[in-house]
Amino acid sequence: MASMTIAKIATGPFTSGERMFITVPVLIASILHSLAMTTAYIALPNMKGNLAATPDQTGWIITSFLVSNAIGVAATGWFSVRFGRKLVFLIAIGGFTLSSMLCATADTLEQLVIYRLLQGLLSAPILPLSQAVMLDTYPRERHSFAMTTWSIAMILGPVLGPSVGAYLTEEFSWRAIFYINIPFGVVGFIGCLLTLPETEKKEQHLDWLGFLSLAVAVGAFQLMLDRGERNDWFQSTEIIIEATLAALALYLFIVHSATTRRPFLNFALFRDHNFVIGTILIFLFGLNIFSALLLLPLFLQEIQGYPVITAGIVISLRGVGTAAGMILSGRLAARIGHRNLIVVSLILIAVPCAYMATWTEQVPVFDVIAVNSVTGLAIGLLWVSLTTVTFSTLPATLRTEGASLFALTRVVGASIGVSVFVAVLARSTQVNYGVLVENINRFNEALGQLQGSGFWSTDNTTGLAQLSQAVAHQAQTIAFLNDFKLLVATSLIGIPLALLLKTPPKTID
C-alpha cells in the first residue's frame, strides 16, 4: 500500500497523471464535507418535529457544527505542520465519517447538537487542506484552473445535497442524511491514503494561549447569539456572562498576539493587501450565503407548505446555477477582471434578495426558481474570483495558514449569520404577531365581514384557534421578509471593499 503513494514532496512538480491521482480523492473529501452541510439544511423542519425542538433551537444543529468547525480550522495550520498534512487530512475524513454515524443515532436534540459539535471539530481540516493540496499540486500559472476544479467539486454538494437530503428524509428519515456520509468517507479515506503526498513535518511552536483565547472568544460569542433570543438577551445573567467572557477572551487574544514573539496567527498574512480584503469579503460571503441557505428551505416548507422533496429540488437549482457560474467565471474574469466580476456578483446576489423581500405566501414557484438560479450563478462567479484574487499574491510558504484562516473566517461568518438571522426571525415573528393581534377587535369591519361569512368566528374556541393560526402564519411571513431585507444589506456592504482589491497576475486556464 505504501508503495502506491506518490513519492514526491507536496509541492511537486507532478506529471498530469500524478495530478489526477492526487486530485480525485481530495475532491471526494471536499464533496463529502459540502454534501453534509446542505443535506442538514433541508432536513431541519423534519428534525424539529422528530426531536420536539422549537424554531430557534433547530438553528443549533447548524451553528454547533459551524462554530466547532471554526475552532478546528483555527488549529489546522499548526497540526498539519507538526504532524504532516496527510495524517491530519486522514484523521479529519475518518473522524467526520465516524461522527456522522453518531449523529444518525441521536435520540434527543442535545445528543444531536453534541455529535454535530464533534463532527464539525474533527472535519475542520478537510476544506482548508484540500484547497492547499490543490494549490500545491498545480503550478502557479494553473491556479485559476485548480481553484475552478476544486470549487466545482465543492458545489456538487449544494447541487446534489438538497435533492438527496430531501429524498432520504422523505423515503426514510432525517437520520439517513448522516448515514449517506459513511460510504463517501470510506472511499475518500482510502483514496487519500494511497495517493496523497506527505508534507515536511516540523517542530513548530503553537501559541496555546492565543489559540485557546480565540477559541473561547468564538465559542462564547456564538453561545450568546444562539441562546440570546430564548433568554431575553441582556436581561439574562447567562447572556451577560457569555458576552463578558467573549469580550475578555478577544481582548486577551489581541493584546497577547500583539506582544508575543510567535503569535498564533502569523501576522505576515496581514501584510498582503488582497488577502486582507479577501478575508473580509469571505466573512460577508459566509454570513449572507449560509443564512440564505437556511432561510429559503424554511420559507418554502413552513410558509408555502412545500413537501420536503419539492423544496429539495428547488434548492438544488441554486447549486446548478453556482456550478454554471464557476464554469463561466474564468472566461468572464479574463474579459472584465476578477475585481469587477466580484462587484457584479455581489449586485446579482443583492437584487434577488431585494425581490424576495416583496414575496407573499402565494409567490409563484417559477419566481422562486428564477431567484434561486440567479443567486446560485452569482455565488459561482464570486467564489472562484474571490478565491483566486485572495491567494494571488500570497507566498507559497503561507498558503496552508492562509487557507486555514480563510476557511475559519468563512465559517465564523456563517455561524454568526445563522444565529443572527434565526434570532431576527424569532423576534420579528413575536413582534409582528403582537401588532397584528391589536387589529382583532369588534370594531374591525373586515374581520366582522369574515365572521359573518363563516370563515372565522370569535364566538367559539375552534374559530379562535383558526384565527390565531392565521395571524401567526402572517406574522412569520413578514418576519421572513425582514430577514430577506437584511440579506440585501449584507450583500451591498461588500461592494466598496471589492473595489479595493488589486488586479492579480494573469493566469492560464
Image (cartoon, rainbow, N blue to C red):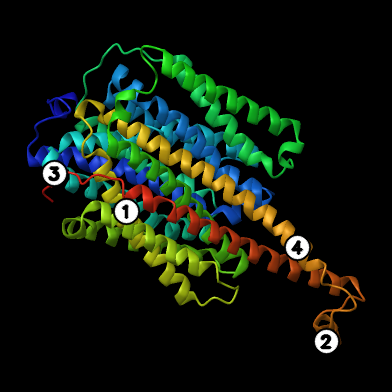
Tell me if 302 is positioned left or right of 167 in this view. right
Question: Distance from label 4 to label 3 (Cα)?
Answer: 55 Å
Q: Amino acid at mark 4?
A: Tyr
Q: Dividing the image into 4 quarters, which one contains the N terminus?
A: top left
Q: Amino acid at mark 3?
A: Arg
Label 1 Cα neighbours within 10 Å, binned few <14 / some 14-19 / many ≥20: many
Image position, residue 327 (x, y; %): 23, 58
Q: Amino acid at mark 2?
A: Gln
Q: Amino acid at mark 1?
A: Leu
Question: Distance from label 4 to label 2 (Cα)?
Answer: 21 Å
Image position, residue 3 (x, y; %): 14, 25
Question: Distance from label 1 to label 3 (Cα)?
Answer: 19 Å
Instruction: Give the structural element (helix, strand or loop) at label 4.
Output: helix
- Earlier in the chain: of badge 2 and badge 3, it is 3
- Look at mark 2 in the image and give the residue it sits on: 449
> Could you tell me which residue is drawn at 80 percent across and 83 percent down?
446
- Earlier in the chain: of badge 4 and badge 2, it is 4
Question: Distance from label 2 to label 1 (Cα)?
Answer: 52 Å
- Look at mark 3 in the image and give the residue it sits on: 142
Q: Which mark is residue 433?
A: 4
- Look at mark 1 in the image and give the residue it sits on: 382
